[in-house]
Image: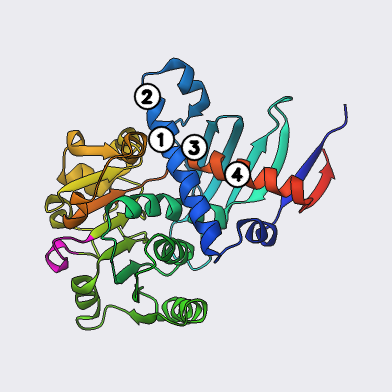
Amino acid sequence: MASSIRVLSQDDINKLLAVGDAKAALEMVDLMATTFAAYTGAHGNAEKQKLAQAPQRIGVETDSHKVLFMPSRLNTTTSIKVVSVPLGDSKGGLPGTILVLDEATGGLSTVMNGAVLTAVRTAAGSAVATKYYAKEDSKSLLVLGAGAQGRSHIDMMIAVRPSIEKVTIWNRGQERRDKLVREIQEAYPKLSVEGVGNEGEGLASAARDADIVCTCTNATEPVLHGKWLKSDVHLNCVGSYRLDMHEIDAQCVKQTEKILVDSIEACTHESGELVASSNSEAWTELGQIVIENQDTKADQAKRTLFKSVGISVQDSAIAGLMAKRGAEANLGSVVPY
């Protein structure tokens, strides 16, 4: 029996995502909220586990990349994402591809560029935590990292906290930092946007002023220090994914009054900062907060932290939506297979 595959390019994905549209961003935040709830709700429930499967990622190492393979299943979408993480300079971003299977035949149905999708789904997950735990009148946002994750986090933070008036972007390299500053100024002309590097007190000063901080770096040594932070700051930490990686120092973790994670199991294996400075018994899965629809107003006055190492059901959630939208809009290239 003849079959075909739909191939969705990065341009196709951008059209389907409507990147930069606030309404589309909030829809993605809602999608990640239901995804976290489905993941957490499946714990200890055999029937629900069939609908939310997220095995631990596996990887191989080449001369220039750590290649990660992440299979998952959410509801009726089964997918696998392949991401190549540069071992050195990462100016080229993170090459990524997601493959979606046909539910009926088990064959491959859709192949899509996953670079933007990874950034968007991760930032949307952070936005879920921000919606629950950042002050409702948050004014100042600090983002560490000027890649795709940094850009997506800015879009998502503004979507859930439109009160933001100032965005500060830190990045070691000036070229990429300045580029993102220009992009954000153009996209949000009413915002005050500035870039800081390692010179002087720029980062420390920005951290002292920040109501929300997002760390989106591949740092192995801390770049953000707890002594700089407000007592009611909300942190989203998404860059590290190994036990030897630390974007934030121990003080950031130890002074946090509420620690949220995407997955307790995954963070136990992959979150260097949390494992080194806290006990997993003190962590709460964000999905549990969503399931219980907890009133977190009082927690918005505390220092809170959301740590995400990424759970693969997020990929199935967003890839399933893109595959559906792509077919409905007849986007991409359909090739025989």
Q: Nearer the viewer, mark 3 or mark 1?
A: 1
Q: CA distance from mark 1 to mark 4?
A: 18 Å
- Please name the amino acid that badge 4 sits on: Ala
Q: Residue 337 lies in what quarter of the image?
A: top right
**Along the horizontal axis of the image, is 41 left or right of 272?**
right
The reply to whether the magenta stretch includes residue 231 is yes
Reading the image, the residue beneath label 3 is 313
Reading the image, the residue beneath label 1 is 37
Q: Residue 100 location in percent, x, y?
A: 65, 38
Reading the image, the residue beneath label 2 is 43
3 or 1: tag closer to the N-terminus: 1
- Please name the amino acid that badge 1 sits on: Ala
Please give the name of the residue rendered at 62% of the width and 40% of the height, measured from the top-left corner. Answer: 320
Q: In terms of secondary structure, where does tag 1 sit?
A: helix
1 or 4: tag closer to the N-terminus: 1
Q: Nearer the viewer, residue 270 or 45?
A: 45
Q: CA distance from mark 3 to mark 2?
A: 14 Å
Q: Which residues are magenta?
A: 225-233
- Please name the amino acid that badge 3 sits on: Val
Q: Residue 49 location in percent, x, y?
A: 46, 22
Q: Nearer the viewer, mark 1 or mark 4?
A: 1
Please give the name of the residue rendered at 17% of the width and 57% of the height, measured from the top-left corner. Answer: 301
- Please name the amino acid that badge 2 sits on: His
Q: Residue 329 location in percent, x, y?
A: 76, 51
The reply to whether the magenta stretch includes residue 210 is no
